[in-house]
Image (cartoon, rainbow, N blue to C red):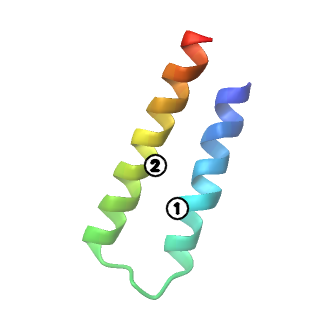
Amino acid sequence: MRLFEGIYQLIDRDVLPWLKSKEKSFESYINTLLRASIQALNKVLILKNN
C-alpha cells in the first residue's frame, strides 16, 4: 500500500505541476516522466530492501 501512496505523491509533486505549467513541450514531459519513473523505481527498491 505504501508503494501506491509513493506513486501518488510523485504524480502529485511532478506530473500535476507540469500539466498546470505554461511550458508543455514534449521534452519537458519526457523529462518529468523519466524523473518520476526513476524516483518510483528507487522507492520500490528501498521498500523491497527494508
Q: Which image quadrant: the N terminus?
A: top right
Work out which quarter of the rendered image holds the C terminus and state it: top right
Residue found farthest to the left? 27
Q: Is residue 1 left or right of residue 19?
A: right
Residue drawn at x 47%, y 31% is 42
Question: Which residue in the structure is indicated by mark 2?
Answer: 36
Q: Is residue 47 left or right of residue 25?
A: right
User: Which mark identifies residue 27?
Assistant: none
Q: Is residue 3 above or below residue 45?
A: below
Q: Amino acid at mark 2?
A: Ala
- State whether residue 31 is above or below residue 17: above
Farthest bottom residue?
22
Q: Three-letter amino acid code at disc 1?
A: Val
| Label 2 Cα neighbours within 10 Å, binned few <14 / some 14-19 / many ≥20 | some
Q: Is residue 37 above or below residue 24?
A: above
Give the secondary structure at mark 2: helix
Instruction: Report whether 38 appears left or right of 45.
Output: left
Residue at image position (60%, 19%) is 47
Query: How far across and down, in percent of the image, does residue 13 sit?
Result: 61, 60
Distance Cα–Cα, label 2 vs label 1 = 8 Å
Instruction: Name the spot of residue 18 as percent of width and height, x first.
Output: 49, 72
Identity of the residue drawn at 39% across and 54% down:
33
Rendered image quadrant of residue 3: top right
User: Contact (CB < 8 A) between labels 2 and 1?
Assistant: yes
Whether 46 is drawn above or below 13: the answer is above
Callout 1: SS: helix
Residue 15's label in the rendered image is: 1
Say which label, 2 or 1, has the lower sequence index: 1
Residue found at x 64% / y 58%: 12
- Residue 16 in the image, given as x and y percentages of width and height: 58, 66
Residue 43 figure quarter: top right
| Residue positioned most to the top | 49
